[in-house]
Image: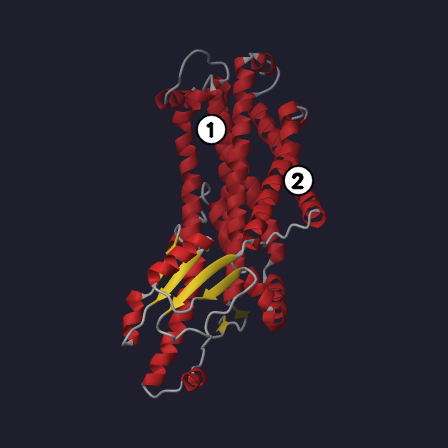
């Protein structure tokens, strides 16, 4: 075992000193922040666009309903025909023409109002226009029936049931949403980490195998130690790169947003809503968010995230290393990658479609114990309150499976790294396990 630290150090330094590794470590955050800045800039340009809409209201029912805003201007047309209104709209290059015909019954408006435009209008704009027209028509309909619409509004009572556990702990929809965000982000982050750095381990094994360097190394180091050293060394290199990415992205995004004055929320559908509600509840919402975050089991989340993150990655890294040892080129790995990726993909689907709906259901619980899916599924369940004993059992099963998988992977590794010029099959690999 005294060779293991040397192997880990060698693998780590080999990775971090690689030119492509260094370039991508610093280039990736620049690309990410550059895309972010470009999208925010284009969104701000789009948000500054003023849309002009002509309104031909032959019914005369909506003359006081269309109020212009900084980004949307309505122009009410006088006495004119629809054809003339279309020609004028095309001549002035307005965004669209809203035509409201003269009707005998309010019910007829639902199928006779037309919006003319050069291209298909945005869904949000049409939704706003439809809501405006619908509210006005419904108010008029109530008035025809001799019912005061304001009285109806005053009589309407909104119900929002309080949520509380049997032990008296309050819960809320906001808290459930935050739990979904935390769990989903943790599971997806692990999924991406395994894909990116698992392939790095596999390519490293293939490179050493094809260069015959492995023949020299294996003469003084046991295959199992070499396999563990590669896994741990590459893992440390991946963590180093990941930490550098996070730090650089945070720094660069702070610099970009402050120096260039880019608003990350520019152009978002909720921006106007937030601007209009600063004095009417936004501060309360922020307070509620902070309260819900404080109610989350932060310590439990952090500890279990580290354990499942490390355990899940090490488990899949051993599989990637064994695949790399079994083949001579990266193109030959395709036939072996599907069995490795399928549990990961299944875990993501179970997490997003089952855990979200019922985090404590039978399916969610079963998949949170299976070691090949538990890192993703259990991480998504923990924010919803998984008993500690279930978490411990899942972690123990995960690391026990990793140890067993390393044993199997080492048997493949010790034979595969010395095999050249032959494409292995599943039958051949099964024979290697019995050697």
| Residue 160 to residue 190: above or below | below
Mark 2 or 1, closer to the camera: 2
Residue at mark 2 to residue at mark 1: CA–CA distance: 31 Å
| Figure coloring | secondary structure
In the image: residue 363, left or right of residue 296: left
Query: Which quadrant: the C terminus?
Result: top left
* Badge 2 or badge 1: first in the primary sequence: 2
Residue 301 visible in the displayed image = yes
| Residue 393 to residue 274: above or below | above
Query: Which quadrant: the N terminus?
Result: top right
Camera-side residue: 296 or 398?
296
Camera-side residue: 57 or 387?
57
Q: Residue at x 67, y 49 (%)?
A: 257
Residue 411 visible in the displayed image = no
Place of residue 96 in the rendered image (x, y in percent of width and height, measured from the top left): 42, 57
Which of the numbered marks, if any, corresponds to residue 243?
2
Place of residue 87 in the rendered image (x, y in percent of width and height, measured from the top left): 38, 55
Q: Tell me the residue that label 1 is attached to.
A: 408
Q: Secondary structure at mark 1?
A: helix
Q: Quadrant of residue 224?
A: top right
Place of residue 409 in the rendered image (x, y in percent of width and height, measured from the top left): 48, 27
The residue carrying pointer 1 sits among few (fewer than 14), some (14 to 19) or many (20 or more) residues within 10 Å by Cα, namely some
| Residue 36 to residue 182: above or below | above
Assess whether mark 1 and mark 2 are in contact (beta carbons under 8 angstroms). Answer: no
In the image: residue 219, left or right of residue 96: right
Q: Residue at x 55, y 18 (%)?
A: 207
Place of residue 77 in the rendered image (x, y in percent of width and height, measured from the top left): 43, 66
Camera-side residue: 103 or 179?
103
Q: Quadrant of residue 211?
A: top right
Q: Secondary structure at mark 2?
A: helix
């Amino acid at each position: 075992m005294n060779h293991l630290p040397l192997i880990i150090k060698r693998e780590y330094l080999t990775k971090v000193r690689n030119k492509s590794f260094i370039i991508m470590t610093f280039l990736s955050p620049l690309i990410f922040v550059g895309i972010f800045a470009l999208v925010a800039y284009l969104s701000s340009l789009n948000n500054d666009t003023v849309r002009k809409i002509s309104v031909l209201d032959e019914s005369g029912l909506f003359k006081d309903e269309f109020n212009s805003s900084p980004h949307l201007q309505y122009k009410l047309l006088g006495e004119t025909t629809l054809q003339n209104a279309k020609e004028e709209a095309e001549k002035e290059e307005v965004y669209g023409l809203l035509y409201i015909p003269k009707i005998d019954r309010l019910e007829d408006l639902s199928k006779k109002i037309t919006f003319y435009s050069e291209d298909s209008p945005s869904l949000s704009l049409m939704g706003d226009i439809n809501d405006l027209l619908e509210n006005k028509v419904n108010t008029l309909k109530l008035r025809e029936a001799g019912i005061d619409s304001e009285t109806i509004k005053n009589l309407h009572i909104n119900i929002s049931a309080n949520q509380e556990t049997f032990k008296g702990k309050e819960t809320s929809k906001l808290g459930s949403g935050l739990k979904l965000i935390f769990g989903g982000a943790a599971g997806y982050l692990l999924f991406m980490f395994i894909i990116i750095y698992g392939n790095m381990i596999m390519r490293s094994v293939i490179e050493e195998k094809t260069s015959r360097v492995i023949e020299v190394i294996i003469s003084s180091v046991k295959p199992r130690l070499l396999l563990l050293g590669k896994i741990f060394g590459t893992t440390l290199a991946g963590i180093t790169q990941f930490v550098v990415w996070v730090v650089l992205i945070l720094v660069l995004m702070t610099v970009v947003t402050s120096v260039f004055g880019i608003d990350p929320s520019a152009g978002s559908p909720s921006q106007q809503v937030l601007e209009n509600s600063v004095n009417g509840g936004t501060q309360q919402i922020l307070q509620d968010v902070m309260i819900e975050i404080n109610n989350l089991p932060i310590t439990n989340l952090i500890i279990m995230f580290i354990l499942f993150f490390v355990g899940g990655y090490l488990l899949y890294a051993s599989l990637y290393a064994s695949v790399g040892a079994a083949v001579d080129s990266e193109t030959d790995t395709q036939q072996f990658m599907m069995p490795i990726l399928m549990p990961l993909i299944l875990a993501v689907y179970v997490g997003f479609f089952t855990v979200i709906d019922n985090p404590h259901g039978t399916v969610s619980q079963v998949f949170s114990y299976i070691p090949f899916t538990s890192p993703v599924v259990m991480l998504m369940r923990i924010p919803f309150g998984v008993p500690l004993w279930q978490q411990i059992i899942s972690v123990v099963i995960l690391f026990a499976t990793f140890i067993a998988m390393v044993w199997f992977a080492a048997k493949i590794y010790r034979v595969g790294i010395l095999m050249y010029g032959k494409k292995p099959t599943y039958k051949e690999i099964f024979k290697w396990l019995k050697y």
